Image (spheres, rainbow, N blue to C red):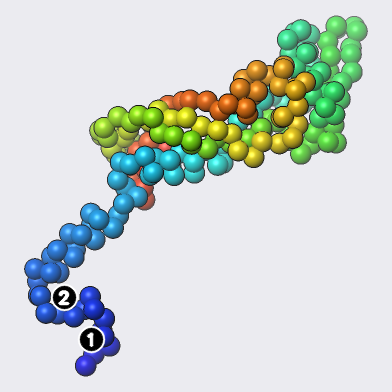
Amino acid sequence: MNRFDHCPTHKILKSSGSITLLLVSLWASTGCNTKTKATPENFTKAVNAYFLERSECLFPNLRFPYATSDPTETKQMDSLVRSRLLESSYESAVKTTRYRVSRTGERFAPRFCYGHREVSSIDHFTPPQTGPSGFPETTIDYHYALKDVPVWAQSADIAKEFPKMEKSTTTGGTDKITLAQTLAGWQVPER
């Protein structure tokens, strides 16, 4: 008796020969590797993993200190001043307001991110076809909600000045994204 004789799978393989081995190999290559199948569950996992590290932010490319004379930007920035995330000073010679990050705002600056997307439903997806990445690709239509929204982003004063943020944090949104099928599962292709 060898060390595998007690294993039920080994007994089946031993007794049924090469036909069973062929069937088990076929099952293992198709049935076990479910993370590569085109299913809403797999798409949800892939999109959620992608956005876990990519938060929604007020200022994706802004650097502080920041100066502006634009009335809309001034209103937006002033709402962050009232919430003690920024500090401001008016420069009358050039008629601009200069904004800098406060101690409270250091934790969120410079981008002031207000949460990350989490898929609430996959609404539609295209049949996978070979894309520019060389892998089968599909385009997904999905609904999302924002998770890990900080308290400052829930302020009515700030929300009023940043309507896109308010909509995303209260009702979520819809979007499209392309996923590529790899051996490790579905992923957003880097382009």
In the image, which disc is placed on residue 82?
A: none
Q: Is residue 29 visible?
A: yes
Can you identify the residue that label 1 sits on? Answer: 5
Instruction: Tell me which numbered mark, 2 or 1, is placed earlier along the sequence.
Output: 1
Residue 73 placement (x, y as % from top left): 74, 13
Q: Is residue 189 visible?
A: no
Determine the image quadrant of residue 110. Answer: top right
Label 1 environment density (alpha carbons within 10 Å; few <14, some 14–19, many ≥20): few
Against 78, residue 144 (above or below) is: below
Q: Secondary structure at mark 2?
A: helix
Determine the image quadrant of residue 10. Answer: bottom left
Determine the image quadrant of residue 166. Answer: top right
Residue 138 placement (x, y as % from top left): 32, 33
Give the residue drawn at x 23%, y 86%.
5
- Residues at discs 2 and 1 in contact (Cβ within 8 Å): no
Can you identify the residue that label 2 sits on? Answer: 13
- Indicate left or right for 31 with 140 as reference: left
Q: Which residue is most to the bottom?
A: 1
Give the residue drawn at x 39%, y 30%.
123
Badge 1 amino acid: Asp
Residue 76 placement (x, y as % from top left): 75, 17
How many circles with numbers are drawn on the protein? 2
Give the residue drawn at x 26%, y 81%.
7
* 116, 167: nearer the viewer: 167
Give the residue drawn at x 72%, y 16%.
161
Alpha carbons under labels 2 and 1: distance apart: 11 Å
Quadrant (top left/top right/bottom left/bottom right) for the C terminus: top left
Residue 117 placement (x, y as % from top left): 55, 35
Q: Secondary structure at mark 1?
A: loop
Label 2 environment density (alpha carbons within 10 Å; few <14, some 14–19, many ≥20): some
